[in-house]
Amino acid sequence: MIRELAQIDVRPGTEADFEQAVAKAKPLFDRAEGCHGAVLWRSAEKPARYRLVVRWETVEHHTVKFRGSPDFQRWRELVGEYFAAPPEVEHVHEV
């Protein structure tokens, strides 16, 4: 199991709208092949910073299958307008 860790900084003042957009987008992850759930975390120290944590079977389920799908395009349509900068994404696994 792989976890995608995406650090997302949003434009200050758009936090509530971003959170609503992510909630609306959750079904896109729920139906994605190889996805086993997504959770959004908000920074206590930096309220415009979030971490999206998504569980994938493999890196390719995220980088090839999901990113190559219309659902990824829809995800970006829903949330992209709130980004202050492109998200920083990495994949990790438990050791």
Image (cartoon, rainbow, N blue to C red):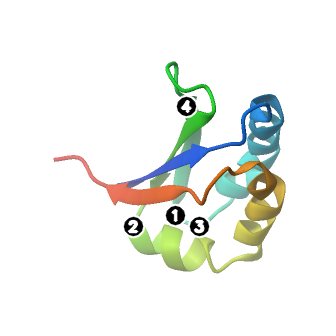
Residue displayed at 82% across by 44% down: 24
Q: Quadrant of the N terminus?
A: bottom left
Q: Which residue is mark 1?
A: 34
Q: Earlier in the sequence, mark 4 or mark 3?
A: 3
Q: Earlier in the sequence, mark 4 or mark 1?
A: 1
Q: For mark 3, give the secondary structure.
A: loop
Amino acid type indicated by mark 3:
Glu
Mark 4 to mark 1 CA distance (whole Å): 21 Å
Residue 58, label in figure: 2
x, y (%) of residue 41?
55, 31
Asked whether 58 or 12 is in front, the reply is 12
Q: Which residue reaches farthest left?
A: 95
Q: For mark 1, give the secondary structure.
A: loop
Residue 41, label in figure: 4
State left or right for residue 90 relative to residue 49: left
x, y (%) of residue 86?
59, 60
Within 10 angstroms of label 1, few (less than 14), some, or many (20 or more) residues? some
Mark 4 to mark 2 CA distance (whole Å): 22 Å
Mark 2 to mark 3 CA distance (whole Å): 10 Å
State left or right for residue 58 relative to residue 79: left
Q: Earlier in the sequence, mark 2 or mark 3?
A: 3
Residue displayed at 50% across by 74% down: 63
Q: Which residue is mark 3?
A: 33
Mark 4 to mark 3 CA distance (whole Å): 23 Å
- Contact between marks 1 and 2 (CB within 8 A): the answer is yes
Q: For mark 2, give the secondary structure.
A: loop
Asked whether 76 or 24 is in front, the reply is 76
Residue 56, label in figure: none
Say which of marks 4 and 2 sits in front: 4
Amino acid type indicated by mark 1:
Gly
